[in-house]
Amino acid sequence: MVKEEQELANRPDNTAFTQQRLPAWQPMLSAGIVIPGFVIIGLAFIGIGVALFVTSHSIQVLELDYTGVENTEPCYRCSDPSSKNCVCTLEFSIDSLFEGPVFFYYGLTNYFQNYRKYGASRDDNQLSGDLDYFKSPGNDCAPYQYNSNNKPIVPCGAIANSMFNDTFKLYQIIRGSKKLVPFDGKGIAWWTDYNIKYRNPSVTPLKNAFNDTVKPLFWSKPAYELDPTDPANNGFINQDFLVWMRRAALPDFRKLYRRITEGDYAKGLPAGNYSLEIAYNYPVMSFDGRKKVVLSNVSWMGGKNEFLGIAYLVIGSLCVVMSIVMLIVYAKFKFPEED
Amino acid sequence: MTWRSPLALVRDALRGQRAREKDLRNLVSNLPYEGLEKRKQPNRYFPGNAIKTTKYTLLFFIPMNLFEQFHRLANIYFVGLAILNFVPVVNAFEPEIALIPICVIMCLTALKDAWEDFRRYQSDRKLNNTPCFIYSRKAKKFIERRWKDVRVGDFVKVICNEIVPADLLLLHTSDPNGVCHIETSNLDGETNLKQRRVMSGVCISDPDFEPESFNSLVVCEKPNNNLNHFKVLCVSIKCKDHMDSPKREKPDKEKVGAGIESLLLRGCTVRNTDHAVGFVVYAGHETKSMLNNNGPRYKRSKLERKLNKDVIFCVILLFFMCLNGALGHFLWLQALPTVPPYLVPDSNGHLDSPGLSSFYMFFTMIILLQVLIPISLYVSIELVKIGQIFFITNDIDLYDEATDSRIQCKALNITEDLGQIEYIFSDKTGTLTENKMVFRRCSIMGTEYPHKENAVRLAVLEESEAEENVLFNKRPQPVKPRWSLDTEDTNFEDRQHQHGSHRKSKVAGNAQSNVAFSSPLVNGFSHSLQSNNPMDPLSNMPKKSGYFSNIFTSWQRKPNRNRTISEDSVVEGDIFNLPEIMEEPGDINGLRRCSLYAPTNSDKPATTSDNLSYEAESPDEAALVYAAKAYGFTLLARTPDSVTVRLPSGEDLVFEVLDTLTFDSFRKRMSILVRDPITKKYVLYTKGADYAIMELLGTPYAENLRGIQKKIAADTQHHLDCYAKDGLRTLCFTKKVVSDKEYKSWFVNRQRALAAIENREQLVMDTAVQLETNLCLLGATGIEDRLQESVPDTIMALREAGIQVWVLTGDKLETAVNIGYACRLLEDEDLVINMSCKNKLTCTSIVDCALQEVRRYNEDPRNVDTTPDISLVIDGLTLNMALSSDLQDRFVELAKHCRSVLCCRVTPLQKSSVVKVVREKLKVMTLAVGDGANDVNMIQAADIGIGISGQEGMQAVMASDFAISRFKHLKKLLLVHGHWCYTRLANMIIYFFYKNVAYVNLLFWYQFFCGFSGTTMIDYWLMIFFNLFFTSAPPIMFGIMDRDISAEILLGVPELYRTGQGEGEYKFSTFWVNMLDAFYQSLACFFIPYLAYQGSDIDIFSFGTPLNTISLFTILLHLSIEIKAWTAVHLIIIGGSVVLYFVVTLAYSAVCVTCNPPSNPYWILPRQMADPMFYLLCLITTVVALLPRYTFHVLRNSIAPSPLVQAKHLDQLDPSTRSEYIKEWRSFRGGGQVKSSRLSTPPSPTLETPVGMYPQSPTVSDIMGDEFTLNVISENYQRHLHL
């Protein structure tokens, strides 16, 4: 016996694996079999589509372009790049209650925050509060690395330099008088950005950390004075800064500016006339851009988005149609053994 | 080391160079120079015996391996891209990151290479340090050294069972006859012993060899790799000792020539000899075995060639995409009114002009989209092939228990070619047949003795005996039925009983014994011959060795014996096998031929004959010797100079062997010249192919016998034809008495020829031809070579699989045709075109007519169902003409219409030229299968060479890409593994292209929204991981394990094989359809999320993450649609990939806070996964992306199912209904292909069937009467077998 085994030393193992006989499931993609699948997917998609569509439909959105391209527009005069500290006011009205919480966005079009070199032009180490990088910002920041006096720019880089700096104030006009709609600027950036990713240097007062540095060329205020009202909203963890630093994926984007969650407006903006006071600073004419303000409320699926609901409806219906086609095909071409 | 001038060194080096390059080398013994420094050594120019087969050295491994790897274009491309990435103006990624994939791949390859090289190093070291004995003048004896110390010019002693360390010229052996035996199994796998002789005429002092007395100059040829050829000349400077050459007396001669028979090859084992001493002529890498060691073969498969074409298309596509990017960037820049804040100037604050920056952008795009050229595809293909080969070699159906051998895959990269074969070229002997020869019948002096029908024909026998008496009326019949009961047979019989293979009655002295005796014959014989070197005498094997048989002629009163000599040798055998017996009682004694044989113990030649076991170089010879033995003529001893035969009477006859005219494929015969011990006459016995013999028949010595001779020749020819029709291998035997004078003069010529260095073969052959004239025909033998198991079945299956099977054989036409019918290569219904013509003109007209006929027939629509299959039978001569350049095209055209082609009497060279012509003219995939040295050319010429490791040694196996042990394994190898390997790999490659395009296009589409700036919305690491880890295992698993159809169905419905032939599944259109699908899917994967996120506050990497995830799902689910059979492994790997993706990405995005700027992935995926939109997007996008492909598959499968799909349906039925359906389906599909009647009663695989088995087989004569007759010309075909 032993000898025999030796003699057959080369004999391959007779296992299901080596002999390629593993139990296998062989799905047959034929019309008869896939009909139920198509029907189920179709119906499920139609269901989801309806839900999405209804949800999306319930979201109110108000977009106000304030670029001032035409001279009839209130901000026309501000759109001239030479004008400084220009403020313009946009009047609008809301017909019915704009349900809260209302999100207040600013939007830019034709703005390529996703331009490759633009995106790379930042120094994450600096932004995480490493003082070494305050003195010598990373080369990626060039040419927004040092100013003409060779002083380091903090925060360095093109993204920070080009931060959006229009500011908005929203008033409700009640019988001719303006009532300020309170904005909530907390928590508009990602929690992780605010708490982990971006950090101020642990120097108090914060201003000292910025000694021997200069603010970005484009900025009017240094980073540590971005929000005089709230010391915790300055430096690199300023919410507006964080929002801006999270680069938009597409050239037409909006970014969250404030939320309207307080006081009389916690339930939403009541119908009526409103006035939007805009400190118009940010130039967009150089790239044919547009600026706008977007008021929107959100649902579980985020902002208003008709597309996804419609897509689900279309694909769902298509699947149902396909299942009918399959049924016909099945009737005409079924395999003999499927009888 | 003394100082030498550089000039002297250079001169020395040049001289060494010249010495090595010279056609002839002069070697002298090292002994007089022993102890001198190296530059005084006469043989210093020749390499030592240390070998080095490693490719690399430790120090230079890295540069050399890199150099090797950069031979691959793909690697250069990727490294070029990586370097490009270091150019700041064009870089798209962090430069270091771009290096990762190429580094990983090259490191893996380097590791693999290093490991292989290390193993080579180890084996080299082991070999180099093997001990051996070298003669030392100081010690006056052989001292133990290492192999690596052996130098050219040394004397080396090899002990029995030791391995020869270098190529040695044999000078001395312990055997008094100066022979020794070597086993060359290390070299060519042949386990039989080969005899080597001491070079005669060189100073030898017996019994003790004194190397110091050797003072000849050895002149040998430049090293070459021919294992069967060697030329050497010894020039004695002064010969102190007396010459010890008993026969070739020429002690005065200064020059002595020798050949391969005196060369011990490195790597062989010495056997049957206590020790042997040789002079080293070649050492180390110049030895024949090392020169034959060419390493693994590299072939490029058809699929890979196509693949490369498609890679080129990918390059073009890449070029256009990059151009698009550059152009887009240019236009985008142009459209900007002024400099926007997001356009970052360089560090000097100055912007490139749009033209320049778009030029840079072109290269950035190349880097960005480089994955379009599938970087990991080549590595994946190699992995897949390793896996496929693992499964092939582990297939238990391809394992042969008898030899305990699996299939060997020698070429690692052409597995998929197995699935595309369109033409098979097969050898016959040993490939279709067993190559185990069984003596069946013989014809002696015109009388036929079939011994199988012995019992039946007893009566007839009497008659024939009577006839013989008339015929050879000079002699009284030598009697006795009782010869078989000679005393010496007793043991023999006992043994036979033990074997149970036959039974012999011991009743003495009566006719019954005859009957009884015959029965064992029917039962067959157990052959113990194991690995003979078979040679089909007709197959032109160059290295034939001699043999001979003799026929007993009654008038001589005693049986004669003939024998042949050959350099082969004898082997000890353990058991003797049954001989076959001719029914003829003693008066005709069988032919016997002994090519080599030796008694078990060479020391005691007198041992009883029944313990003999013969080893022959060709199995035919062994069969003849055994047959002779069974009739009482026992070959007892065979030395180079003599043959001892024991007659039935117990008397031993010793024939002195004067010379052997060895076989060569030109003469197709061999002869032995012996001196009859009784008459003292010189007699030449010749054995050979009938056509080679018949024309040499001359006037016999007695005038009055002339008429009889004529009749004998005619009768014998008739018998030969019958044998051939019966599928037997035929040999003719003749004798010739040579007068003393004639011999003397011939001998002088012969010696001169043997001593020649130039043109020696030709001269030797000429002398042979010179003597082989005026032969007197003695008779002929028919030896059966059984078909291997399942050969007809296999050939049927291959033909149904759409493969044209050609059989190329050296056998004669009739034999070949009969084997053709037996193995179902030819069918009764077939239209057989027989081409055999003597001159070019006829040949041309035959080809033309046949072609016309065939074309007309094929074009006629009425013949659709009735067209018979056409087969072509052609002989070597005609083939030569048909393959000439002007006829070639027409011949190939004709052959294309033939379902099978049978070429007989072809030479090895013709075999390969047939393969080459068909392969090149028809642009088809060819496979050649063979087992012998004569098939090596063909095996190498074909796209796939398959060697059968059988009786004929390993030359074919060594030259082959795959080695199998039985012909029937071809069926599963091609139909199942070939199909699987091909579909798997083809689908895998297509999938790979798809995968890369689908993924990389996401980046491309994004460029339209980022100003064509080369931004990626996916983290670089994740992108790299995506290709390297997340999506690489599933396609590899798919390529190794997918199983579209089960093996049972593939074997049951061979037609399925056709799907792989020609273009197969990997069509040009398939490639583009998949590319389009990839484009569509990438569009869906990009634009659905795009539309969903349009205008929102999504940031770049939050946008990219769902894209990446969707891509993963789409790509994996796409594969799931393609996977035909899901096993647990599939599930685990695909599921594992998804899990791996999420685990890695989540971990990465949780850990990486500031790493990898600017694409910081921190917390992006976790945040996305908290958003229901993410899942909704993934769901719909994946469905939209895959819906068209899925629907297309479903509709195609339902409306126009491919054969594969239909077969898959069958697969799911239970076995019984399945076979039912297979039958139905096949008959429905098409009639002509399967002859049901045949299927039900497959013919016996052997030729055991009576001669009348194929009565209606259209032999050529039938065909001539056929209405479709196509110019049949045949000379010998009109004769029918009369029994």
Image (cartoon, rainbow, N blue to C red):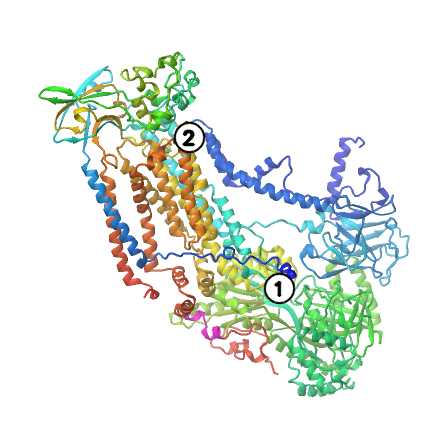
Q: Secondary structure at mark 2?
A: loop
The C terminus of chain B lies in which quarter of the figure? bottom right
Vertical position of residue B667 compared to residue B1193: above or below: below
Please give the residue where the numbered disc 1 appears in the rendered image. B402
Q: Three-letter amino acid code at disc 2?
A: Cys
Q: Tell me the crowding category of disc 1: few under 14, some 14 to 19, or many 20 or more residues within 10 angstroms, Cα based.
A: few
- Viewer-side residue, B1102 vs B907: B1102
Instruction: Please state the extent of the stretch shown in magenta in the rendering.
Output: B1231-1240
Q: Is residue B947 above or below residue B115?
A: below
In this rendering, which labeled residue sits more in front, label 2 or label 1?
A: 2
Residue B790 within the magenta-colored segment of the rendering: no
- Residue farthest along the front direction in this orientation: A263
Q: Check disc 1 and give the amino acid type.
A: Ala
Q: Residues within 10 Å of mark 2 (few under 14, many from 20)?
A: some
Q: From the viewer's perspective, is B308 left or right of B175?
A: left
**Mark 1 or mark 2, which is nearer the start of the sequence?**
1
Q: Position of residue B497 (x, y in %)?
A: 70, 76
Which residue position is annotated with label 2?
A: B1152
Q: Chain of mark 2?
A: B
Is the Cβ of the residue at disc 2 closer than 8 Å to that at disc 1?
A: no
Considering the image in quadrants, where does the N terminus of chain B appear?
Answer: top right
**Residue B499 occupies which quadrant of the picture?**
bottom right
Question: Judging from the image, what secondary structure is the residue with disc 1 in?
Answer: loop
Residue B1237 included in the magenta stretch of the image: yes
